[in-house]
Amino acid sequence: MTKTVRDMMTKSVQTLGPTDTVTQAARLMKDLDVGSIPVVENGQVCGIITDRDIVLRVVASGGDADRRNIREVMSERIVVAAPDWELAKAAKTMADEQIRRLPVVENGKLVGMLALGDVAVDGNKDRVSGEALSEISAPSHPKQ
């Protein structure tokens, strides 16, 4: 039987709002040992804040994480998965978009989170998933 996103996703997902501070996001990431937090406003996913967003958009510019809100630094262009997708489809989406985490949305509401590690657990059983995972992990080249 083919596994779906619902089978592998984390179901209890902590979220933050766009007006919460970057410091709150960093502390929650530390407490949960995760690299991203979905941002929800009025029950809808409006963005995602990642550890990379915090480093590049706040720390590297000498910004004050206590005074910056998440809306200022979050990634607004988010890619989501549906819980009934096959894992291979989710893995291909992750590879195509070069992302390691997918919020899972059903009927407009966040119902889970699928991470690269979740797909990797089952990815070795499926050629498409395995190829997609290797594409996600392909090294990028630094800007010249």
Image (cartoon, rainbow, N blue to C red):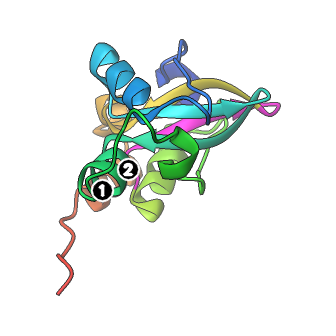
Residue 17 in the figure: left or right of residue 91: right
Residue 12 picture location, percent across and down: 54, 12
Residue 143 picture location, percent across and down: 21, 81
Q: Is residue 87 visible?
A: yes
Quadrant holding the C terminus = bottom left
- The residue indicated by pointer 1 is 56
SS assignment at label 1? helix
* Residue toward you, 4 or 12: 12
Measured in 3D between alpha carbons, the distance from the residue under mark 1 to the one under mark 2, in whole angstroms, is 5 Å
Residue 92 in the figure: left or right of residue 100: right
Residue in view at x 35 percent, y 39 percent: 116
Residue 20 picture location, percent across and down: 55, 29
Residue in view at x 51 percent, y 45 percent: 90
Tell me where the magenta segment starts and ends, as one range.
Answer: 99-108
* Looking at the image, residue 125 lies above or below residue 88: above
Instruction: Find residue 80 and report its image quarter.
Output: top right
* Looking at the image, residue 36 lies above or below residue 29: below
Q: Is residue 4 visible?
A: no
Residue in view at x 25 percent, y 56 percent: 134
* Looking at the image, residue 3 lies above or below residue 96: above
Instruction: Find residue 95 and report its image quarter.
Output: bottom left
- The residue indicated by pointer 2 is 53
Assign the magenta stretch its main secondary structure. strand
